[in-house]
Image (spheres, coloured by chain):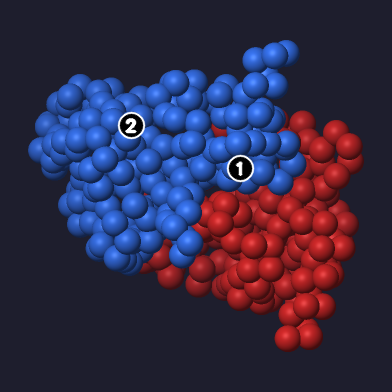
Chain colours: A blue, B red
Amino acid sequence: MINSIVNHVTKHIELSESEIEEFCGLLEEVTAQKKTLLIQPNDIVTKEYYVVNGCLKAYYLDESGNKHILQFAIEDWWISDFEAFFKGEPANLYIEAIEDSVLLSINKNVLDELYLRIPKFERFFRLKTEGAFVSLRARILDSLQKTNKERYLKFCELYPQIEKRVTNYHIANYLGIKPESLSRIRKEINRS
Amino acid sequence: MINSIVNHVTKHIELSESEIEEFCGLLEEVTAQKKTLLIQPNDIVTKEYYVVNGCLKAYYLDESGNKHILQFAIEDWWISDFEAFFKGEPANLYIEAIEDSVLLSINKNVLDELYLRIPKFERFFRLKTEGAFVSLRARILDSLQKTNKERYLKFCELYPQIEKRVTNYHIANYLGIKPESLSRIRKEINRS
């Protein structure tokens, strides 16, 4: 379990054995059965989660009870209500396990202390955040200029592993289209 | 001019006089008259720009010649084709001055060396990127769950200075709605 996060981190920064040991000592193992809520609106969010195994979603529930999926996370991804986590504000989102999942969590205060002791971790999280930032820019650009069909095909191309593991209803929620529209698009693709 | 970026940076990190001097020595002043293109598709993007004065837009031009505005930037903001800048890939976007603008640019290689010499800058840019990342998450969430009218009102609330300085056409492009629809929304708001 620890191996996967160590490989993940050392893709971006070099760490000594003692630095790896120190980092791993700060992580907590979390197991979340399918449908477990790790975060709910108004929670104070002190943790972000690295996915060792499993699949989760981050979503917003609007006043009419409609679900809007902001993010999926599978193996090797991080998930949290990041706005609440970064700013120390109450959560707006739900984080829910779609499959039985095993996670490693790190606490915000612990991470802030780690940045001071080993600034290379500041680099690691800067690089991860830059990557996440440009993915969101691409998602916004696609929502401005691509058709729903093109956006669905891009989703399948970018996240083939997620497309296999979540329902059509989830993907429609993520793309902001009606499930019926997504079914039509999928039929059209299968016909062609 | 240097004062504004020093104030901007020292809101997030403490710097000694010599660190400020070193940082400022790495910046280049850039003046861009209205309609100047700082970046065009296929350019190798080596710089990001801090806005001292003025207003700029980052946009994508699709195959049919439609403009999709991904970002505006006014005083105290950073702008670039960030995907190309971070990944060292050719640009997909145009960066264009909407007003006569004065900018400070920093080169990617120079910045990477600065991170090694003064890791506090790694912190500064981590914090700025986290802020930008959560703003984009909020923008995506709004596009999934808010009406066009609500999204326009949110834009006016978040960016009153930008709303005053750019055309309706620009704002419609940014929101991904037709200029006619935005005109209708504005009339509706003015009537109520």
What secondary structure is found at the residue carrying circle 2? Answer: loop
Q: Is residue B63 above or below residue A63?
A: above
Q: Is residue B29 above or below residue A142?
A: below
Could you tell me how far apart the alpha carbons at marks 2 and 1 are, in whole angstroms? 22 Å
Q: Nearer the viewer, residue A74 or B31?
A: A74
Discs 2, 1: same chain: yes
Image position, residue B6 (x, y; %): 51, 68
Q: Residues within 10 Å of mark 1 (few under 14, many from 20)?
A: some
**Where the C terminus of chain B falls, by quadrant?**
bottom right
Q: Is residue B69 above or below residue B170?
A: above
For image coordinates 88% across by 57% down, the residue present is B35
Residue kind at label 2, given as amino acid type: Cys
Residue kind at label 1, given as amino acid type: Ile
Q: Which residue is mark 1?
A: A177
What secondary structure is found at the residue carrying circle 1? Answer: loop
Image position, residue B9 (x, y; %): 48, 64
Image position, residue B153 (x, y; %): 65, 73
For image coordinates 29% across by 65% down, the residue present is A42
Answer left or right for B169 relative to B71: right
For image coordinates 48% across by 49% down, the residue present is A68
Identify the subunit bearing mark 1: A
**Where the N terminus of chain B falls, by quadrant?**
bottom right
Quarter location, residue B64? top right
Q: Which residue is mark 2?
A: A55
Decide if residue B114 is in sight here. no
Identify the subunit bearing mark 2: A
Mark closer to the chain start, 2 or 1: 2
Decide if residue B69 is in sight here. yes
Q: Is residue B17 above or below residue A23?
A: below
Quarter location, residue B15? bottom left
Answer left or right for B54 relative to B34: left
